[in-house]
């Protein structure tokens, strides 16, 4: 077994390791039934919502995605494979994974309560990392069994608020191509979280190159025709409007996740919908992803340090590169409050279900 110390953090302080601006290399969509599509059909556009909207409205008609099945890296691998077929060359990177895995790693230094279990395998020079679905499912079940405080909204309701906010903020095309009627009637739309647009980007941290896939909520204007231009992505978030000093600290800790998640895919803007305790949308704030670490350090409570997260991640990725050098299935595990991340082999050979047969066959023919 190999282990990597998170603490002490001062090892990662100072100037930030080299980072490469994430660049979209391909994309895919899930439609309203969550069926995979190799296109941008689920791309959505931002148009400000009406303040005062009730985020609980329509909870009983929510078309909620069943996330109990394990999707592994299937869609990501499919989109990469199709890109390779089209372009005629192979997508080389030290790591291929979902954005969610990278967010967990990046925020680990400042989130003592975070825990994660991931599976990894090595194939043709790349480390593929997926979420360990069993561990996640067990954890979600534990959370579901926790009863909310009397009078407090349920976990399910609070999660609905996030999706309702998205529905209130999104339109299916650039604003002048969408009817006034549609924009004004978004509050009556049935909330459905089956559809997603996923961006697949190439990026780099320190000496590691990565291909990361993740959902982006919306584009501010439209995707530029020139593929080399950055895309004005928008990340939508809801949060309770902080009222006290304790609330402000809680919000600042949440900003760490917002920042890491957006930074990884190169999303420049985060729009926060502040709500009351019982889910009424009160105000909006636009945050610039790039400026968040500086703001937290200078004007906030300094509860996290973005540079340190980048340096930590760069050196953790190097550790993984030194450790995961053969096939088989490796477990990457951080337990709650643990000061170390442990990496050990759970299956001696093969790639388990991390890779699809289709992807392995394709690559082996090349
Ligand atoms: P909020 O983040 O506004 O609460 P994302 O912001 O990543 O695009 O996710 C959209 C919404 O999905 C979230 O909105 C939240 O409502 C819901 N969501 C995401 N992760 C969740 C989780 N682990 N548990 C419950 N709901 C979650
Ligand atoms: Mg989202
Ligand atoms: Mg969002």
Image (tube, rainbow, N blue to C red):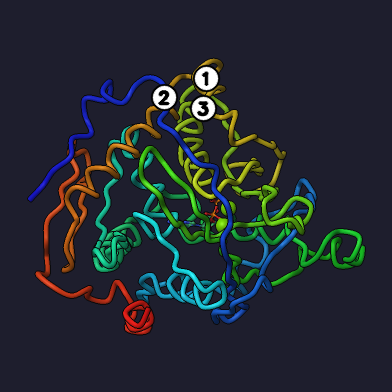
- 236 to the left or right of 325: right
**Total tally of numbered discs in the picture:** 3
Q: Quadrant of the C terminus?
A: bottom left
Instruction: Kindly indicate whether the residue at mark 3 contacts the one at mark 1 (C-beta within 8 angstroms).
Output: no
Tell me if the residue at label 1 has its CB under 8 Å from ligand 1.
no
**Mark 2 Cα shell of 10 Å, populated few (<14), some (14-19), many (≥20):** some
Report the Cα–Cα distance between label 3 and label 2: 10 Å
**Residue that carries the numbered disc 2 in the rendered image:** 303
Residue 30 in the image: x percent, y percent? 57, 75
**Mark 1 Cα shell of 10 Å, populated few (<14), some (14-19), many (≥20):** some
**Residue that carries the numbered disc 1 in the rendered image:** 300
Q: Is residue 106 above or below residue 99?
A: above
Closest to the observer, 263 or 210 = 210
Q: Which mark is residue 293?
A: 3
Q: Secondary structure at mark 3?
A: helix
Which of disc 3 and disc 1 is earlier in sequence?
3
Which of disc 2 and disc 3 is earlier in sequence?
3
Closest to the observer, 102 or 193 = 102
- 204 to the left or right of 346: right
Residue 112 in the image: x percent, y percent? 28, 36
Report the Cα–Cα distance between label 1 and label 3: 10 Å
Q: Is residue 162 above or below residue 284?
A: below
Q: Residue furthest top?
A: 298
Instruction: Kindly indicate whether the residue at mark 2 contacts the one at mark 1 (C-beta within 8 angstroms).
Output: yes
Closest to the observer, 294 or 194 = 294
Q: Secondary structure at mark 1?
A: loop
Q: Residue at x 32, y 39 (%)?
A: 108
Q: Residue at x 23, y 48 (%)?
A: 320
Residue 147 in the image: x percent, y percent? 36, 56
Residue 199 in the image: x percent, y percent? 57, 61
């Amino acid at each position: 077994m190999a282990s990597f110390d998170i603490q002490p953090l001062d090892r990662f302080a100072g100037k930030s390791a080299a980072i490469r601006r994430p660049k979209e290399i391909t994309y895919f969509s899930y439609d309203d039934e969550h069926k995979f599509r190799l296109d941008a059909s689920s791309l959505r556009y931002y148009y400000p919502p009406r303040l005062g909207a009730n985020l609980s409205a329509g909870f009983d008609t929510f078309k909620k995605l069943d996330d109990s099945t394990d999707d592994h890296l299937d869609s990501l691998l499919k989109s990469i494979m199709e890109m390779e077929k089209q372009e005629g060359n192979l997508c080389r990177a030290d790591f291929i994974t979902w954005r969610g895995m990278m967010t967990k790693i990046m925020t680990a230094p400042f989130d003592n309560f975070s825990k994660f279990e991931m599976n990894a395998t090595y194939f043709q020079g790349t480390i593929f990392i997926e979420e360990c679905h069993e561990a996640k499912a067990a954890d979600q079940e534990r959370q579901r069994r926790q009863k909310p405080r009397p009078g407090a909204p349920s976990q399910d309701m609070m999660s609905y608020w996030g999706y309702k906010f998205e529905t209130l903020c999104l339109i299916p095309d650039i604003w002048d191509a969408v009817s006034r009627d549609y924009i004004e009637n978004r509050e009556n739309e049935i909330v459905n979280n089956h559809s997603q647009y996923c961006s697949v980007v190439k990026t780099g941290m320190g000496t590691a190159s990565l291909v990361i896939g993740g959902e982006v909520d919306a584009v501010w204007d439209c995707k530029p025709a020139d593929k080399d231009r950055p895309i004005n992505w928008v990340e939508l978030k809801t949060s309770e409007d902080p009222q006290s000093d304790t609330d402000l600290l809680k919000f600042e800790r949440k900003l760490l996740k917002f920042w890491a998640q957006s930074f990884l895919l190169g999303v420049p803007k985060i729009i926060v919908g502040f709500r009351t305790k019982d889910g009424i949308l009160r105000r909006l704030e636009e945050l610039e992803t790039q400026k968040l670490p500086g703001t937290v350090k200078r004007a906030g409570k300094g509860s996290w340090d973005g540079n340190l997260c980048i340096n930590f991640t760069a050196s953790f990725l190097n550790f993984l590169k030194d450790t995961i050098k053969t096939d088989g299935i490796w477990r990457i595990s951080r337990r709650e409050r643990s000061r170390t991340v442990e990496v050990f082999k759970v299956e001696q050979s093969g790639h388990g279900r991390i890779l699809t047969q289709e992807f392995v066959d394709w690559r082996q023919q090349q």
